[in-house]
Amino acid sequence: MLDERPPKVDSEGAFHARGVRPQRHAEIDASPMNKPVITRFAPSPTGFLHIGGARTALFNWLYARRMGGTMLLRIEDTDRERSTEAAIEAIVDGLKWLGLDWEGEPIFQFARAARHAEVAHELLARGRAYRCYASAQELEEMRELARKEGRALRYDGRWRDRDPATAPEGIRPVIRLKAQTEGETVVEDQVQGRVTWQNKELDDLVLLRSDGTPTYMLAVVVDDHDMGVTHVIRGDDHLTNAARQTQIYQAMGWDVPVMAHIPLIHGPDGAKLSKRHGALGVDAYRSLGYLPAALRNYLVRLGWAHGDQEIFSTEEMVAAFDLGAIGRSPSRFDFAKLENLNGIYMRAASVDEILAALDAVMPELGPVRGIGEALSPALRAKLATAMPGLKERAKTLVELLDSAAYLYTPRPLPLEDKAAALLDDAARRRIGLLAGRLSALPLWSAQSTEDAVREFAEAEGLKLGQVAQPLRAALTGKTTSPGLFDVLAVLGREETLGRLADVVG
């Protein structure tokens, strides 16, 4: 075909590609020729590691772990205009943050261009490829005719059997695969089932461009073969590519890897995932305060099921993951569900785990709050003491840091409007009196301060809330916070009395 873009996929996962017949089948051999399983994640470094790519990497990583194999990382940087070092760094950083490792050093596709060209010329020598001298004008005429006739855009094979000696002058040829014109190309897909293409609908694809550079189709096949990849797990937007790549494998006499094409991720409304749905880079989810373990758990359940289980440890994921349990319909991204899941992980995490997660995001979150790119020893100690109350209320690290603002905001604390409203003249008078009682306590703790506040409220003939709410506003600047008496305990006697003095004036 002249148009080498992947087929369109509708919201139900149906493929709009002429001659394609997907059919679910029962069981497929897990590894060709019983080789050790090798998977690969092969992103293009033209942007961030988006959430769909992260899920693909996770599925490759889990399957390799489950089968006792390895995952490789290949950077497909053949698009030199759009590939950037910043994108490569973002991809590597995102994978590391998610806890997804790979075997060896990343492999860069562009550096292997000479090897790709070598294979193209080997196919030429075998008679499985040919030089095509069709001009740009001829190719455009083919496209125009196809549009007029309402058929798929296909190269008509005009140089397939012609003598190169008859080639016009000044035309630098491409090398095309001499594809099969009869019969079928079949992919036994672990997710989509048996998918069949009529060979008459697949034209002679370009392997090597006129400038000698390889096409994506050729480069992927050569790299996967040379890397020993046994399983290709990727998005189902590559399904038509699988047919064309299978033909290259067969032309070279190479084993075709097991294929698994996973459905794409859609938004909660069923539309293609966009930024408004959550199509952000993995680095953005880190900045939003999600834990990597929670994001891994959420991603694994996007399209894969294991009974009714929702919460998985990494060990459980590895033990349970299999390609046959991946559904064929697009999964739907749900930010609220991710947030709730992250909250579960937050509450289950230890103090040290939360502090370690904060360390990873402080360069992004800390400066915004005026607390620097790293936790100071003093603030770390305060957070550790306050952590039980903080993590019970927070669904993300961002929420936790915001709830902990009373620990690091410099005095005098700014007051939210609702908090300021609680501190009227009567409330300030009571706080002044309460401060005297608190200063006299022989022992400072959550329990002793609670007893003192309760005794003060009773003595003044007030309900506890009439004292506690203004006290919270004075100590935190807000109307909501972790447990008030935990706040008093964490702040300590000196800081507490100082803040009350700021309010009383």
Image (tube, helix red, strand yellow):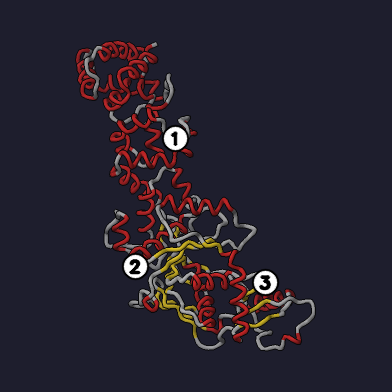
Callout 1 amino acid: Ala
| Residue identified by numbered label 1 | 374
Q: Residue at x 27, y 62 (%)?
A: 307
- CA neighbours of label 2 inside 10 A, class few (<14), some (14 to 19), many (20+): some
Q: Secondary structure at mark 3?
A: loop
N-term mark: 1 or 2: 2
Left or right, 138 with respect to 470, comes to right
Q: Position of residue 335 (x, y in %)?
A: 41, 49
Q: Residue at x 51, y 73 (%)?
A: 240
Q: Please indicate, yes or no, whether residue 357 appears anywhere in the rendered image.
A: yes
* Residue found at the very far right of the displayed protein: 169
Q: Quadrant of residue 438?
A: top left
The CA span between labels 1 and 2 is: 40 Å
Quarter of the rendering occupied by the C terminus:
top left
Callout 2 amino acid: Met
Q: Position of residue 150 (x, y in %)?
A: 62, 77
Q: Residue at x 39, y 49 (%)?
A: 292
N-term mark: 2 or 3: 2
Left or right, 286 with respect to 1, comes to left
| Residue identified by numbered label 2 | 67
Callout 3 amino acid: Gly
Q: Position of residue 207 (x, y in %)?
A: 61, 75
| Residue identified by numbered label 3 | 212
In the picture shown, does residue 447 fall above or below 125? Answer: above
Quarter of the rendering occupied by the N terminus:
bottom right
Q: Residue at x 42, y 20 (%)?
A: 411
Q: Please indicate, yes or no, whether residue 12 appears anywhere in the rendered image.
A: no
Q: Secondary structure at mark 2?
A: loop
